[in-house]
Amino acid sequence: MTPESSPATIPNVFRRSYSFTCLLFILASVPFCRAQVQVTSTVIDKKTGAPITDVSAQEFHAEDDKSGRKIESVEFKTEPMDSMLLVDASLVGESVRPVVRYFIEQLQPKEEMALVGYAGSASLIQDFTASQELLKRALTTIKYGGEPRAMDALYAAIDSGFSNSTYRRVIFLLTTGYEGNSSQRDRDVVALARKNGVTICPVYLVGAERSTFESLAAKTGGASFRLNAKHLETLRDDVPRIVKAIRGHYLVTIQGNRAVGEKFRLTVDRPKLSVSALPLD
């Protein structure tokens, strides 16, 4: 090899150019990863509570503190869930008892369910199990009395109730609809639910706290349902519809690596639909 062709004699400028070209080639070979945020959403008909399963990405809109965020994709999914029945055990709570049994009967293979009673505080009645028999037996042991403090019970259940869960985390708040003097506010409950990835689904008999229940559901990827207290015989048909609406949900992918704020919300281009959102880590 002559000196002229030796690598040592190649000018530095050409060697730098060669290195830069190699770097570009390496970068071009690495898949481009766009930052994304994913959100769980439940969409139901406000009047009937029926699940809406055919909303397209073009119909969804994301807004975060008055700023729009681009929807990249939408996928409707039906997956197992680990659910907790948070049951009103206050002085007025016994009217909810028929509802609980029907929810237990919706438990599917692979899924687990827990039973928690609440009045002034939350008490574990039956830990997560796949056995409907154990859950129904535990239901008969609930003792009723005291003031219904749903917000305190929700906060306690979300804080420590799902430490060993496998699937999507869902709380069905089965309540008469009355709320006592809780120390926790609904916004504190929402913040903790978002942090722990828990969906809240209030199911109630009277509308005293309707706006609070709807807010809890909308901000945690759930839905709220009002039952007809005068026609409890219809519950056998109502409860399967409710569970079906929650088990099926949308996974919405939003462009950007910025976490969503407290005022984040989803909407769809159809009237009379209830739309919720739970940001996922």
Image (cartoon, rainbow, N blue to C red):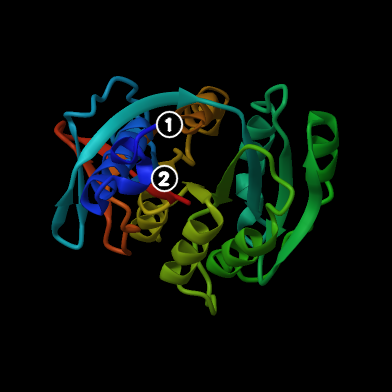
Quarter of the rendering occupied by the N terminus: top left
In the structure shown, which secondary structural element does the residue marked by tag 1 occupy? strand
Number of numbered labels in the structure image: 2
Horizontally, residue 212 falls left or right of residue 108, namely left
Residue 187 image position (x, y, % from top left)? 41, 69
The relative height of residue 160 versus residue 61 in the rendered view (above or below) is below
Q: Amino acid at mark 1?
A: His
Residue 28 image position (x, y, % from top left)? 30, 34
Q: Which label is found at residue 249?
A: 1
Q: Nearer the viewer, residue 272 or 176?
A: 272
Q: Earlier in the sequence, mark 1 or mark 2?
A: 2
The relative height of residue 112 versus residue 185 in the rendered view (above or below) is above
Residue 96 image position (x, y, % from top left)? 61, 46
Would you call the spot at circle 2 few (<14 residues within 10 Å), some (14-19), or many (20 or more)? many
Q: Residue at x 47, y 38 (%)?
A: 230
Horizontally, residue 194 falls left or right of residue 55, namely right
Say whether marks 1 and 2 touch (CB < 8 Å).
Answer: yes
Q: Which label is found at residue 221?
A: 2
Residue 97 image position (x, y, % from top left)? 67, 44
Q: Quadrant of residue 5?
A: top left
Mark 1 and mark 2: Cα distance apart in space:
8 Å
Q: Amino acid at mark 2?
A: Gly
The relative height of residue 53 versus residue 262 in the rendered view (above or below) is above
Q: Is residue 252 visible?
A: no
Q: Nearer the viewer, residue 61 or 42?
A: 61
In the structure shown, which secondary structural element does the residue marked by tag 2 occupy? loop
Would you call the spot at circle 1 few (<14 residues within 10 Å), some (14-19), or many (20 or more)? many
Horizontally, residue 148 falls left or right of residue 63, namely right
Q: Nearer the viewer, residue 136 or 265?
A: 265
Q: Nearer the viewer, residue 36 or 237?
A: 36
